[in-house]
Every structure is written in structure tokens, then in C-alpha cells.
Image (tube, grey):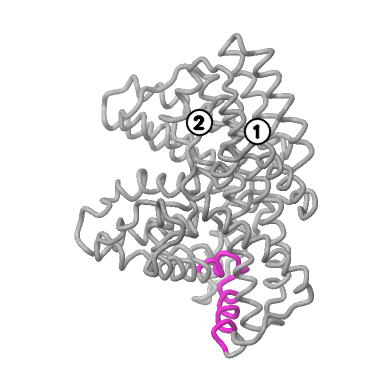
Amino acid sequence: MLFNSLDFALFLPVVFLLYWFAANKNLKVQNLLIVAASYVFYGWWDWRFLSLILISTLADYVIGIALSKEDKPAKRKLFLWASILVNLGLLGFFKYYNFFLENFISAFSFFGAEIRANSLNIILPVGISFYTFQTMSYTIDVYRRKMEPTRDVVAFAAFVSFFPQLVAGPIERAKNLLPQFYEKRSFDYGQAVLGLRQILWGLFKKIVIADNCAYYANMIFNPSADYSGSTLLLGALFFTFQIYGDFSGYSDIAIGTARLFGFRLMRNFAFPYFSRDIAEFWRRWHISLSTWFRDYLYIPLGGSRGGTWMKIRNTFIIFIVSGFWHGANWTFIAWGALNALYFLPLMLSGSNRDHLEIVAKGKTFPSLKETLGILMTFSLTVFAWIFFRAENIGHAGRIISEIFSSSLFTLPRFSAMRGAATTIILVLGLVLAEWFGREQEFALAAFGPRWKRPARYALYYALILAIFWFGIQGQQFIYFQF
């Protein structure tokens, strides 16, 4: 079920009313309702894949209890690996089977050996990269004795399948989200209003910004050989705001929806395009995944504690694995490796934690140094997104080659340029709104509460009007494919 669909517009109020009016007196019933609603939400797409969520849920629930009863290190490690193999096994089969098969055949063909093997027509289950990582982190934390395992199977099933963040995050930690299913929840009007405001802003970013940018990015990228360097650069910029509006918009809707039900989800985006270096960008982009890899891969590998070569190795591992997590294509691996190259100079010079506060905090405008840093970081990010969007490495190479040709200095031209101008204005409006709202959790939070009611409601109605006027309805979220 899509957040930007009529189905969800009907589903959400029904679940909300049942949750607060029919099930509000019993915590267990509320949690059962969340599980049922979450399974309906996910099964709306394809009910057959509910079995995968159920397998992950039951496997890690049982393994968590087994870990609490076992003190022998060897057996505890065996239980841990059982969880990892179940979750990564499901993820690996559905997401990477054909990728590894095709590259295996290609490798042997390179040496003159022919191997015949048929790829499988595998449908990638929506959200599998997210919920497998979420449930796997629970088992790892129990193994590390950082938390006690739950014996409440309903609460655990609700944690794994919680519908607001089930299919595209944030990837929650059990230490944050699971205890919230044990607590008595009371309706908080202020949080509900804040949640609705965040949902509205998320829908605006998705439907008005991301979907319109996607239309023009696809128009330019798909027949890319027909366009000049300046037009291809414009396409890369459209994709840059498409992926941000799409994914951060999803996170805003997810976090806002969770607020309606009395839950607090972690922040997933913190205005990343205002970052002054690439290290700051990765502290602000897809925060739940970045911190997951930091805590469960980078630090166990040794982090930054070893010598220079260990730091370089660990940095490349973390970024390449992050790229591969996004998809079974060499373009994602190249995107991850490129970001590792961006990050290395900062890490080796010890300046990767220079910018921990939001840029120009308490000021209207950034300094010249901050402006140059933002522009440089944004430019590097746009360049890296070309690999992320391209169909293959060769496609990315052709686009980059044309961008760095003399045609870069011509005016962008393509058939829908006039319509694209409106989208460019909308993107500039988004950038301005996010700049002036950058000290809040999300941009709209900076405007509504400070304004008088007529101005506040005028802003809300303007956003709703923009969603219906400029919006392209029912478009799938880009991260569903990851």
C-alpha cells in the first residue's frame, strides 16, 4: 500500500479510530491491532510475501530467547549466525541471486569456459532490505547483552512489522522502538497535530517535488545519447532532488504517522544538501542506515582504531556494502566506492567531525566559507548520483563524458523544457523552505506554530492545493526497489 494512494487515505483513519476508540483500554489489543494492520498494509501489495516477515519474526524471536538461556560462547555465536543466515539468506536470494549468477557466468566466460544456467524470474519483496536489517539488529544486540530479549511475541511482531516504517524505514533499533510497545499509550493532541504537519510536508516533497523531478529525470536519462552535457547535468539535478524528496518524504510520512499512534521513530534525514563536507552529508542522509552500518559493521571491523591501512579498508568496506545494499548492480557499488574516495581525505586528516552543528545556526545566511563548502559537497553528491541513476557503468560513463564536454556550456534543451521550468521553481521553493526551517526536525515545523491561525491554515491549504494541482498521483516510492 502506497502512502500517496487513496487506499492509504482510507486505511489510516480506519486504523486510527479503531486504535484509539476500540482498543485504547488494552495494550495487548492495541499491539495486536498494529500487527493486523501492518500485515494488511504489506499484504495489500502481495500477500504471499507476508511469509517472509513471519519467518524473520519467528526466527529472531526464538533465537533471542535461546541466547538469553545460553552462556557458552560457542553456542551463543551459533545462535547469532543462525539469525544472520536466515535474514541475509532471504535477502540474498530475492535480491542478489540473479546478480551473482550472471557475474559468475561472465567470469567463467572471460576465461573461455561456458556455463549454462538459467536466471530466475524473482520478484523483489518490497521493504525486505529494511525489515531484515531491523530484526537482525535485535538479535545482535541481545547477543552483545545490550538488551534483554522480549518474551512478548505480539510486541515483537509489532516491532518488526510496524506499518509506518515497514517498507522504507527508518530502520529502527529494538532498544528504541520495542520498549514503546510495552508502554501504555495515551492520545497526545499536540503530537498528533505535529504528526499531521509532518505527513503533509512529506506528501508535498514526494508528490509535488519528487514525482515531477522523476518525470523530467527519466525523460533525460533514458535517451541520454540525444542530449548535451548541460541537459544531462540538468537531468542529474532533477534526480538529485527526486531521490531526496522521495526518500525523505517517505520518512516524514512514516514518522508523522507513527506520532498519530503515540510512537517516536528516529530521524532519518537532517537537511543533507546543506552539508559542508561529505562526512557531514553522511551524518544527515539516511541516518538509520548509516548508523546501522557504523554500529554493526564498521566498529566490529575495528573502526578507526587501527593503522592507516585498516582505516582505508574499513571505509571502503562500509561504503561498498552500503552501495550493494541499495541494489544488485555494479552502479551501486561504484557509487559506494566513489563516496569512500570522497570520505577518505577527511578521515585521514581527522577533519571528518568538523561540522557537527547545523550550518549557520542562529543566522540567516552562511559565511562565504560555508557557502563554498555546501556548493562543493552538493556538486560531489550530484556527480555520485549519476552512477546511482544510470542503468549500468557504461551508461554512467557516457553521461559523465558528455557532461565534461564543450556541450556543457550550451543552454539545456529537451522537449519538455517549458514544463520543467515550473518544477525548477518548485524545487527552489523547497530549498528556501528547508533552509529557513533547517533548525527544526522538518521544515514545516518552523513555520506553522509561529504564525497566527489564518496564516498557518493558509500555508497548509496552499500545500494541499499544490499536491492536487502539481502532483502526479500514485507513483511508487523510489526506495521500494531497494
Is 3 left, or right, of 339 in this rendering?
A: right
Q: Position of residue 311 (x, y in %)?
A: 27, 60
Per the rendering, the mark at residue 50 is 1
Q: In the depicted view, which residue is nearer to us: 399 or 153?
A: 399
The answer to whether residue 190 is above or below residue 434 is above
The answer to whether residue 395 is above or below residue 133 is below
Per the rendering, the mark at residue 427 is none
Q: Quadrant of residue 426?
A: bottom right
Give the secondary structure at mark 1: helix
Q: Earlier in the sequence, mark 1 or mark 2?
A: 1
User: What residue did someone put label 2 on?
Assistant: 264
Q: In the depicted view, which residue is nearer to us: 344 or 128?
A: 344
| Screen quadrant of the N terminus | top right
Give the secondary structure at mark 2: loop
Identity of the residue drawn at 69% across and 53% down: 121
Is 112 left, or right, of 427 in this rendering?
A: left
Is 415 left, or right, of 332 in this rendering?
A: right
- Furthest residue toward bottom: 406
**Is 396 colored magenta in this rendering?**
yes
Q: Which residues are magenta?
A: 384-405
Q: Position of residue 6 (x, y in %)?
A: 79, 39
Q: Residues within 10 Å of mark 2 (few under 14, many from 20)?
A: some
- The amino acid sitting under disc 1 is Leu
